[in-house]
Image: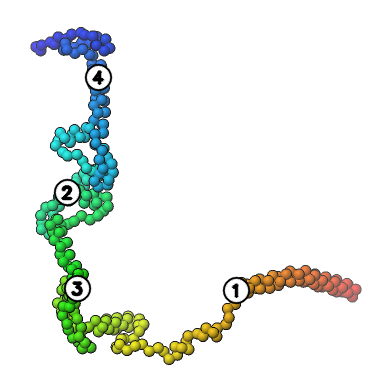
Amino acid sequence: MSKRIKTIVKTCAKCHKPFSTADDNITLCRECMNKDLKAEAAAELARQNTVAETRNCKYCGKEFTITVGEKEFLEEKGYSLPNYCPDCRKALKDYKREHGGLSHICKKCGNEFKYSVPMVLDFVFKQKPLYETCMDCHRKEREQEREHRKGHSGNRRNEVYATATCRDCGKEFVITVGEHDFLVNHGYENMPVRCRDCRHKRQVNALVTDMRRMGEEPVDTIITSDEPIVPHEDAAEMVPDIDAMPEQVDVAAATEADTSTSESQEAEAVSNEPAEVNTLSGSFDNAADTATDNDTNTETA
């Protein structure tokens, strides 16, 4: 048989109502104890929601607050205080949940690397592409690109690399260091064998040939020499003689004269309208009288 617990009837210290309990140390009834617990919880919640620190987001620059409860929780877990606002932290959390974290495999060396937080936020908010290679491979690509660009610019690009004789005109021309580096960097093995002018002529002639093949009429004929352009024989006659041109007419005066002439013509037309109406009415009366006389003569006959 189970042992029966002895209860004691006591009076609540707050509401003075009688209640039964098995613990002699309890002085409050159940209702008063629940009220005290709720009040204590509300005070604790207010304390935890108190602002402990204000910071600016490292990514978007927005100001956000860190409460006492968050600070105590992070310190208890051994985490550092956040440097990003709640919106950026939520976007970062969603990206980690969708892609399984910030880790990625380099497409060149095969090593695993992690994206930085600003890089991921740029991808989420600004749709900027993420790098497919690690920082070491990316740094090597940048160095190769810089070496490639050195062939396009620099202090030595105008220096003489070699001299050659043009295959077409026989003139001697110079190949600069910049031209040589450009051809080598772009995979060309042979150096130029024609001077700049002959190369330009060949390009123009090739363009003219393509235009004729497509059915277009070229603007100029094929360039075959450096002779100066001779003007047309009748070029002087084609230019109009300014002295022989008629004098300019005052547009405003001519407009006023035309306006006055048109107004006078309209006035005359209005004055002639009644006379025409009278003439028509008279002709109608004469026609009616003639018709009446004809009817009378017919009856008499």
Q: Is residue 279 left or right of residue 89?
A: right
**Residue that mark 2 sits on:** 102
Give the mark toward the camera: 3 or 2. 3
Q: Judging from the image, what secondary structure is the residue with disc 4 in?
A: helix
The quadrant in which the C terminus is found is bottom right
Q: Residue type at mark 4?
A: Asp
**Residue that mark 4 sits on:** 36
Q: Residue at x 58, y 81 (%)?
A: 247
Distance Cα–Cα, label 2 vs label 4? 47 Å
The quadrant in which the N terminus is found is top left
Task: Name which quarter of the figure residue 205 lies in.
Answer: bottom left
Number of the label disc, if any, that sits on residue 251: 1
Task: Name which quarter of the figure residue 290 lies in.
Answer: bottom right
Give the mark toward the camera: 1 or 3. 3
Marks 3 & 4, CB-CB < 8 Å contact = no
Q: Judging from the image, what secondary structure is the residue with disc 1 in?
A: helix
Distance Cα–Cα, label 1 vs label 3? 63 Å
Marks 2 & 4, CB-CB < 8 Å contact = no
Q: Residue type at mark 1?
A: Val
Chain-order first, disc 1 or disc 2: 2
Mark 3 nearby-residue class (10 Å; few <14, some 14–19, many ≥20):
some
Give the mark toward the camera: 1 or 2. 1
Q: Residue type at mark 2?
A: Leu
Distance Cα–Cα, label 1 vs label 2? 79 Å
**Residue that mark 3 sits on:** 157
Q: Residue furthest bottom?
A: 233
Q: Residue at x 19, y 81 (%)?
A: 174
Distance Cα–Cα, label 3 vs label 4? 87 Å
